Image (cartoon, rainbow, N blue to C red):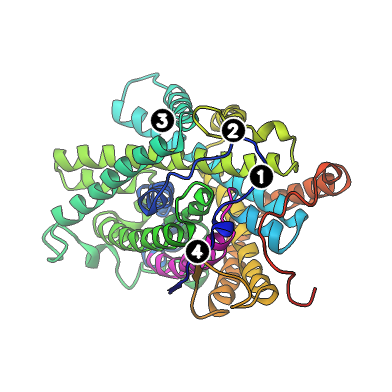
Amino acid sequence: MTSTPVSPSLTNTIHGDRVSLLRVLGPVHVWALGVGIVLVGEFTGWNFSADKGGALAALIVCWVVGLLYTSVAMIDSEVTSTVAAAGGQYAQAKHIVGPLMAFNVALFLVFAYTMLEVSDAILVGDLMVTVAGTEGLERHGFVVLTIAVLAWLNYRGVLMTLNFNFVITALAYLSILVLFFSVQPWSQGAVLQLGQLVTPENALPYGWIGVIAAFQFGIWYYLGIEGTTQAAEEVRSPSRSLPYGTMAGMITLLIAAAITWYVCASLLPWEYLGFTFFPLYDAARVTGSGALEFIMFWGTVLSAVASANGCINDAARAWFSLGRDRYLPSWFSAVHPKYRTPYRSILFLLPIALAFAFIADLNQAITFSILSGVLQYTFMSINIMMFRRKWPLGSIRRGYTHPFHPLPAIILFLLCCVTFFAIFLGFGTQLIAMVAFYFLISLWFHFYRYKFVRRGDQFTMPWPKPQGY
C-alpha cells in the first residue's frame, strides 16, 4: 500500500454555490459505516450457504468470497480516494466509463442498500416476535419503528449518525467475541462439537456443485463493505480515511466471519444451520447459558440496526448524487441548511423501504440485495482496468495505489461470474427479471432523461485528458 498527498483541488468537489455536505468524518467513521452495514451478515444470511452445500461449503465460500471482497476493498480504496465525491461507485463511473453506466451503477447502489435495509428491519421484527412468544404479535410495528427512527437520525446529521453506528457496531462485534471465548474454543469437545457435526460423510452433502451454489449466500458475510465510498465527500482526508477505514473494516470482518462459522458449525447441525434465521443467537441458546442468550439477542438486534442505519445513509447519498447531476430531477439534490444532509433523498426513499418491508420476505430481500451488489462488483473490475489505462500511474495524483494490479480485478471478475451462476441455480427468474429491469430503465434514461443533464457540470475532477483521447 502506498499513499501520496492529494492536492486541495482533488479533495474538494465543487458543485457551485449551493449548500454542500460537511467534511466532518475520520477513519473511525468510515470503519463504522462499512462494518456497521456488513456485520449483520454474521448474525444471519451467511448460514443459508450451509443449506446449499453443507457446513464445509459455508467455510470454503467464507474465504473465497473474502478474497472477492478484499479485491473490492482494494479497488474501491484507490478509485474513491482519488474521485472523492458522494455517490461512491456512481461518481467513479461517470468520470471513467460514461453517463449510462453511472446511472445504472447508482441504481445498483440504491437497490442493494434499500433491500439490505429492508432485510435488517425484517430481522429485527422477526427476532422480537420470536423472543416475545406472544400470540398474535406481528413484526410490522417493529419494522416501521426501526426504519422511521433511523431515517430521522440520518436526517439530523451524518456525524451523529455514524458516531451512533460506531458504538452499536462495536457492541455487536464484542458480543461475537464474548460468545467465542465463552465456549472454550481452544478445547474442542468441552462445549464445541465440530468433529461430530461436520464429518467426512456430511461435509459436502451435495458435492462441489453445492459449494458453487453456496456462493449466493456466502456474499452475505461481507455484503456492503463497499458502502464506505459513500462517505467520500464527507471525510476530512479522503486519501487517508477511505483506505484505512475500508481495509481495517475488511480485516475486522474476515476475523468475525471465521469466528462465526467456527462457533456455529461446532454447535448446530448443518441441516439446522442452513434453515435458521438467527444462527449466532441459536448457538448461544444451545450452550444453555441465559447470559449468552441475552448478549446474542442484543448483539443481533444492534447489528441489524447498525446495518439499516448505514444503508439509509448510503442509499440517500447515491440518490442525492443522481439529482445533483440531473440524472434525476434536481429536487433530490437539496441539502438541509442546518443539518447539511440530503434530506429530500432520505425522505423519498423512506416509504419505498417500508413498502418492500411489507411485501417481501427475508430470503427475497436478501437475494435482491445480493443481485444488485454483484452487478456493481462486476462493474468495478472493469472500472479499475479502464481507470489505470486512461490515467496511468504518475498521470494524476492518487490517494492510494492498490498493489498487484491487474490481479485483484481479474479475481473479482471471475468470482462474480461464479456468483452469477450460483444465483441462477437458486433464483434464475429473479436474476433474469432484474437484468431486464435495468435494461429497460437504461433505455428510458438514454432516450428521455439524459437530455436534462448538464454534461459539463457533472465532471468535477481536474484531470488531464485520458490517454489515447
The numbered mark at residue 125 is 3
The magenta stretch spans which residues?
A: 59-86
Which of the two marks, 1 or 3, is nearer to us in this view?
Answer: 1
- The reply to whether callout 3 and callout 4 are in contact (CB within 8 Å) is no
Quarter of the image for the C terminus: give it.
bottom right
- The reply to whether callout 2 and callout 4 are in contact (CB within 8 Å) is no
Residue toward you, 419 or 86: 86
* Crowd band around label 3 with a 10 angstrom C-alpha radius: few (<14), some (14–19), many (20+): many
Which amino acid type is marked by label 2? Answer: Val
Circle 4 sits on which residue? Answer: 77
Residue farthest along the right direction in this orientation: 447
Circle 1 sits on which residue? Answer: 15
Is residue 11 found left or right of 177 in the rendered image? right
- Sequence-earlier tag: 2 or 4: 4
Depicted 247 relative to depicted 349: above or below: below
Is residue 231 found left or right of 389 in the rendered image? left
Q: Is residue 304 visible?
A: no
Distance from the alpha carbon under mark 1 to that under mark 4: 23 Å
The image position of residue 97, as x and y in percent, is 72, 63
Circle 2 sits on which residue? Answer: 335
Which of the two marks, 2 or 4, is nearer to us in this view?
Answer: 2
The image position of residue 33, as x and y in percent, is 42, 48
Which amino acid type is marked by label 3? Answer: Gly
Distance from the alpha carbon under mark 3 to that under mark 4: 35 Å
* Residue 111 part of the magenta-drawn span: no
Which amino acid type is marked by label 1? Answer: His
Residue toward you, 267 or 207: 267
- Sequence-earlier tag: 1 or 3: 1
Q: Residue at x 74, y 69 (%)?
A: 465
- Sequence-earlier tag: 3 or 4: 4
* Crowd band around label 4 with a 10 angstrom C-alpha radius: few (<14), some (14–19), many (20+): many
- Sequence-earlier tag: 3 or 2: 3
